[in-house]
Image (cartoon, coloured by chain):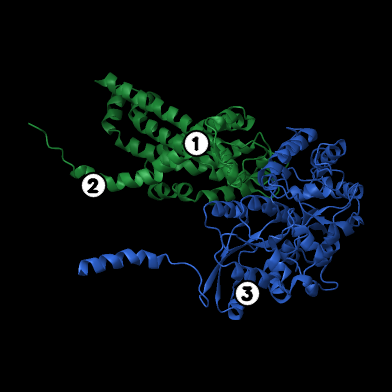
Chain colours: A green, B blue
Amino acid sequence: MKRKIDLFPYTLLTPALSVTVLIIFFPIVQTAVMSLFNYVIWKPKDTRFIGLGNYLQALRDEVFWISLKNTIFWIVGVIVLQLLLGFVTAMLLNREFKWRGLARSLILIPWVTPSVITALMWRWMYDGNNGVINDLLVRIGLLKSYFPWLANSSTALPAIMVALMWQGFPFFAIMILAGLQAIPRTLYEAAEVDGATRLQMFGRITLPMLTPILLTSILLRIIWVANSMDVIFVMTGGGPGYATHTLPVFAFIRAYKGLDFGYASTIAIFLTLLLIAIVAGYVIRVLRSQEALR
Amino acid sequence: MKRASILILLLLFPLVLFATGQDEGQMATIRFWYHFDNPDAAVTPLVQKFEQENPNIKVTPEFIAWDVYNQKLLTAVAAGNPPDVSQIKLWWQPQLVEMSALLDLSDYVADWDGRDDVFDKIWELTEYTDGNQYLMPLQMVILYMYYRTDMFNELGLKPATTRSEFLDLAKKLTRDTNGDGTVDVYGFGIRGARGGHDWWGTFVLSSGAEFFLPNGNSGLITPEAVAANQWFIDLYRVHQVSPPTTPNDGFQQIIANMQSGKTAMTIHHIGSSKGLAEALGDKLSAAPVPKGTKKYWTSFGDEENGVLAATEFPDAAFEWAAFLATAENNAIWQKSSGQVSINKSNATAGGNRFLKATTDSADFAGVLPAHPGTAEFVESLWPTQMQRAFLGEISSAEMMQIFADHFSK
């Protein structure tokens, strides 16, 4: 007997899928196609199919490799900083204290502040002539004179990473706090009865119970941080020199300063491949751990 | 029969919606893109005046942020949806001409009554290399040197007229004023971020560097040009007469530094004079930039109006551009833009010290080459390579070779 296929669920999903295809998949395909063309907006007569020409050019481009290196440093550094600060914050907010409700609301401020405002605010805080950070560091004796944090190629990217840490730690704080509150108290009580120390409870109960949330949060933040370029662009424009060029910043500059949309699309595709590799690694790990549990 | 009638009406309805073209007496709507440094400055009085004088033409102005203006205009042209009239920088002209985006206004200008009232130098600078006139003049933006009169008076100094005098001044003005052992005033504020090529041009293009030699070869890699560029780099790296933040300093930072007394001199134009004068009063003055080893060079940082070739109303579009270029209306425009009128009949004898510095610089103000690569040079290539040179990552010769390679494409 033939099984009748119920089309009703698919019908309900069609509008959402159509929008997703239109605003996500279509631009991705368009970008991939553009990367195979020599396409400079102000040279319409020179537009032609060049196959992998842009990709070979990128692999020979010193600025591409600098941007890739900076991107990896940027992702690892920002995630570690956000995770550490978010973890500590979540642990503190999980305790009982008088203003806990207010504190839980206030930590969202960095997260809800628009990126451009965050960037402008931190840019002026770091200012090498009038910035409050320099003023404080000189007053407490850590610096002898004001330092040009954003004009020095060694400190520019780490300085922006601190700004991103401030902006993004609330996400980890909220996710980890939710995870902490889901851990049954009975586990800690049983461990206490068995004579476990606080450190042992943290390592044997807290961390393992938080692992799924941590992995998902880290994966999401990797994708968001890797793609973020607005704070960098407002604070330094990718400079000084190429010191704060990451792949999305480089792609943006090639597209909107050089108007070379073909090459910019290629850089964007390289970033996409990098992120696909990271996501694929995570998915394979999760599938393997699920297999092991069966 | 009834169904067929309804069907025919439904089929004809879209044609009515998409009907275009201007019949005699039909309203022409001109989309106008513009920019003022002060976003609160109004263009509506001029729009209302124009519409009263031209009842068949409606102008829809749209303010565009400067940072994205070039990209927005070019992408609008590529997308087939540009404005009818737009403010345009001279160095965008080659790209727009390459895209066949600009209407040739030569015949319009030849028949225009107000032609002779515009300074001849402006027509000379705005004519394109193919001999056509694609742009209608709008405002003069000539850069000069600001200086802090209080600091100059304190040290008994006068504005420099030559490059070597300037270096000497800058060194004397760079000092520790509060005795704490660290320098807190710098002689010269250099704009190392985007837009700073004008500072560079004043000292490098005046001292032996040229974008192109008469034979078409690059004039940026001659020993003289490399030496001139090295002199400019040394202002920051060797003589340290510019703040440590220089590589990242943009417009906001150089103006803030002048205002706070962090720097004693910097380069800009009359558009910033109102705000600085309000803050500093008589502690601020201006003079033409010093002469290099060969000549004077300062930026004729123009903006003109262009009529986009895609316009459906070329006559009406030119009427608006010409309206803004006539003396009475151009004077009203400059009240909002803070810049200098292009009209001979608006020229005033004397004027304030900033206007004097502007007009004293007019004879030697120059423009960047009419080359398709100039826009990218200004937007990203110059700031990136200048920052690398300031930080010691590349040498002067390497920096100039990168520029030469770019313009040779």
Graded by Cα atoms within 10 Å as few (under 14), some (14 to 19) or many (20 or more), the crowding at tag 3 reads: some
Q: CA distance from mark 1 to mark 2?
A: 33 Å
Residue located at (70% from left, 63% from top): B106
Mark toward the viewer: 1 or 3: 3
Return the x and y of residue B220 as percentages of the image width and height: 80, 40
**Image position of B44 with respect to A225: above or below:** below
Graded by Cα atoms within 10 Å as few (under 14), some (14 to 19) or many (20 or more), the crowding at tag 2 reads: few
Nearest the viewer among B176 and B354 is B354
Nearest the viewer among B386 and B341 is B341
Q: Secondary structure at mark 2?
A: helix
Number of marks present in the image shown: 3
Could you tell me which chain the residue with mark 1 belongs to? Answer: A
Q: Secondary structure at mark 3?
A: helix
Using residue A215 as the reference point, say whether residue A39 is left or right of it: right
Q: Secondary structure at mark 1?
A: helix
Could you tell me which chain the residue with mark 2 belongs to? Answer: A
Q: Residue furthest top?
A: A292
Query: Label 1 amino acid?
Result: Ala
Residue where numbered disc 1 is placed: A226
Query: Label 2 amino acid?
Result: Leu
Residue located at (44% from left, 27% from top): A277
Q: Are marks 1 and 2 on the same chain?
A: yes
Specify which label sits upstream in the sequence, 1 or 2: 2
**Image position of A64 with respect to B39: above or below:** above
Nearest the viewer among B205 and A182 is B205
Residue located at (84% from left, 44% from top): B214
Residue where numbered disc 3 is placed: B46
Query: Label 3 amino acid?
Result: Leu
**Image position of B398 with respect to B342: above or below:** above
Return the x and y of residue A185 as percentages of the image width and height: 28, 33
Residue where numbered disc 2 is placed: A12
Return the x and y of residue B142 as percentages of the image width and height: 78, 59
